[in-house]
Image (spheres, helix red, strand yellow):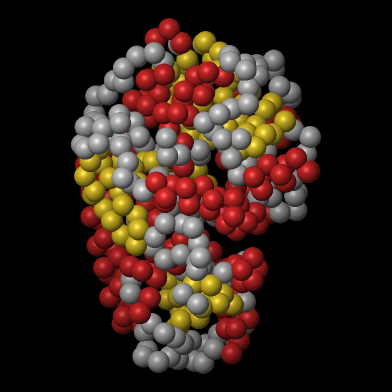
Amino acid sequence: MGKCPICKSENKEIILSFNCGKFDGSRLYRTVRIASCLFCGHIFNDLEDNEKEDLNEYYDKEYALINFENIGVYEKNNPNYDKLSGKNYFDLYKIIRPYLNKNSNILDVGCKTGGFISYLYNQGFRNLFGVDTIYPYVDYAKKVTSYRIEYCSQYSLPYEDNFFDFINMNQVLEHISDPLKVFSEIYRVLNDGGLLCVGLPDAERYSNFYFFDLYWFSLREHIQHFDLEHLYMLASQYGFNIEEHFNTEYNMMSDKMIMPNMYVIFKLDKKSRNDFKIKEKFLLKRNILLYVDMERKKSSDKKKNLQFAITPDAPIYLWGIGREFFYMYENLGLKQYNNLNLIDSNIFKQNNFLVDGRSIQNPSILESAPSDSLLIISAIAHSEPIKYHAGLSGYKGKILEF
Ligand SMILES: [Zn+2]
């Protein structure tokens, strides 16, 4: 398995390993192995080469299709758009506004369907460019907008040297297996003195933002876990110096699901490409070990509660077949039960996916649930609407929410 993505050392220690369930035939890897580099202290998912290749395929063939429902960028009547994407765009814009002028050539790396580009357009910027590695997103953007959005690898950007004044790279780097290679491309296309804004999850603060047990590691798309020290250690190898940094809160799928985020503004000094500098190599590792310990205790309590709530032979319903479900399935002992009924309101999941041969049902199956059933709300972010809809469907069994 791999070298440290930041310092290239081969010496590492696995500090956490657990399985997560997945849809049948999914390309997503099953075992999360979190490594800590013994030389620089960086925390990363130690994927095999074939797992990395599968993950790339996964984005195009599974991730994009499942997540399309949550992309309301060009659909004004999608309630998700204004509330969550809108807030995130607004927060980011406030931070980068002082660094932009109307003539800046601006690149958004990982622009998805062009949501932030359209936000900047509405603020009066015109020299806007975007790239994404997920083909269905770019294809959609090309069909419904006239923005200059290209499909390409982050390792090979289709622009001339020194073309850009400002590059935005928000929620990208944590997904990338070779972040140094991305920095070498950014270095090439950004002009000397140009600015780069990096937004990503702040691993230093994982333990302060509880959503579900080990959630920040069970997001299997996130394979790098940075704190500011390690991000700087990466960026400084290509002459990037920190101008400003901000700790923020990033809204994910609902108001309940808030990710600790940092935005860092870097200024490029092409003459000062230097060796990496770092002060607190192992502070991140110490914090992560405490986080892991705390989360494992929570899981062991949940496992006991679950065993207590289950009536043998009575049906178990699980509503929400996503990340928390896949964690629960393997780590709370759910996998062993034969009487599981899976529910999700996402029609794409109902029509296309199975979990160990089990189909995913429409929530209306709760109408015929017997009164000794157990309903486990596994979509934590949506527990209130789920309880409401279960009530509407006349569900009379027990409800367990974590
Ligand atoms: Zn390292």
Q: Is residue 31 visible?
A: yes
In the image, 29: left or right of 347? Answer: left
Q: Is residue 343 visible?
A: no
Q: Can you tell which quarter of the image residue 400 is in?
A: bottom left
Residue located farthest toward the front when viewing the structure as drawn? 50
Closer-to-camera residue (315/235): 235
The image position of residue 302, as x and y in percent, is 32, 70
Which quadrant of the rendered structure holds the N terminus? top left
The image position of residue 284, as x and y in percent, is 27, 38
Residue shown at the point (51%, 39%) measured from the top left: 171
Q: Is residue 169 above or below residue 72?
A: above
The image position of residue 114, as x and y in percent, is 67, 38
Which quadrant of the rendered structure holds the C terminus? bottom left
In the image, 122: left or right of 343? Answer: right
Closer-to-camera residue (342/265): 342
Residue shown at the point (57%, 57%) measured from the top left: 62
The image shows a total of numbered marks equal to 0
Residue shown at the point (64%, 65%) measured from the top left: 348
Closer-to-camera residue (54/293): 54
In the image, 336: left or right of 108? Answer: left
In the image, 364: left or right of 25? Answer: right
The image position of residue 279, as x and y in percent, is 24, 24
Residue shown at the point (38%, 82%) measured from the top left: 337
